[in-house]
Amino acid sequence: MSLRVVVKIGGDLLKGESPNLPLIEDLKALVKEKGLVIVHGGGDLVTEMATKLGKEQKFVVSPEGFKSRYTDRETAEIYAMVMAGEINTKIVGFLQSFGINAIGLSGFDGGLLRAERKERLVIVDEQGRKRAIEGGYTGKITSVNSRLLELLMGEGYTPVISPLAMGMKFEPLNVDGDRTTSAVAKAIKADVVIYLTDVEGVMLDGKIVPKISIVEVDGLLKDIGAGMSTKIHAAVDAIKGGVGRAIITSGFVDRPILDALEGRRGTVISL
């Protein structure tokens, strides 16, 4: 029985002067099972392009400590251009050059990702006070066209998805990459969802935590940084949605995915 895996990669994992060969080799091994879906990030490149275009970027912090980009209409257009255009195309071309038959998708392609626009965002201002602001063009995923992914995987393609969703009025919406990964994993009934990052797992007191049960998460969050907290919340969401296990691990090591699947690396989050 083949293993169905959804992998989240950061925008920095497949860029640079030299390719990340260990990651490529692991992805190629998973492709043979016809059960791989990739979701990518790339927020830093969105910020970089927006700066070049003279559009200052604003970031907000939620009461839970999550930092996110405030997406007005102009920022949404830049986000779509960079995520679904520049980054997705580069990653697909890169994977194709190594023999992986990748196909690039955004939420607009075949209605892959539909999302509801957030009318209001609750943020914490610089004085530490909570207040509500207009939601802008940020969305929460409501549906994933799993049938499209099934068809593509069945024909030997590897979907590479950018976290850009189509709103109810067919507008572009910025959706969190980790949450997108969780939504996709649930939709295709993945066995495993893997979040690749730049650290080797969830750290507590300077040590990697090898396993976390979802019932332990709330007690640990206060000791975990906001960036990792986002991944943990997404992982818990995936597990509650029927995914077998979630793994947070480094993408910059030898055998980053295969070792994680074999329980040799990273932090496993499960029931």
Image (cartoon, rainbow, N blue to C red):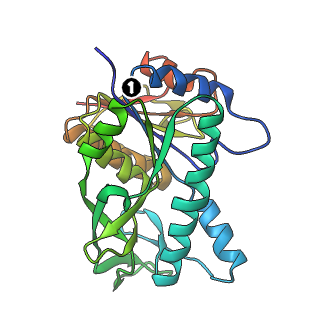
CA neighbours of label 1 inside 10 A, class few (<14), some (14 to 19), many (20+): many
- Asked if residue 263 can be seen in this view, the reply is yes
Q: Split into 4 quadrants, where in the image is the N terminus? A: top left
From the top left corner, tell me how far across and down residue 213 is, in percent: 28, 32
Q: Which residue is mark 1?
A: 34
Secondary structure of the residue carrying tag 1 is loop
Side of 68 where 96 appears, left or right = right
Q: Does residue 193 sit above or below 258 in this rendering? A: below
Query: Residue farthest to the right?
Result: 17
The image shows a total of numbered marks equal to: 1
- x and y percent of residue 53 in the render? 68, 80
Relative to 89, say whether 74 is above or below: below
On screen, 207 above or below 57? above
- Point out residue 10 in the picture as x, y percentages from the top left corner: 56, 47
Q: Is residue 215 visible?
A: no
Q: Decide: is 168 above or below 109.
A: below
Q: Quadrant of residue 269?
A: top left
In percent of width and height, residue 18 lies at 77, 36
Residue drawn at (30%, 80%) of the image:
120
Q: Nearer the viewer, residue 21 or 213?
A: 21
Name the residue at 56% across, 26% down: 256
Q: Amino acid at mark 1?
A: Lys
Which residue is drawn at the image coordinates 52% and 53% (left, top)? 41
Quadrant showing the C terminus: top left
Tell me the residue at 43%/54% (across/down).
177
Image quadrant where residue 232 sits = top left
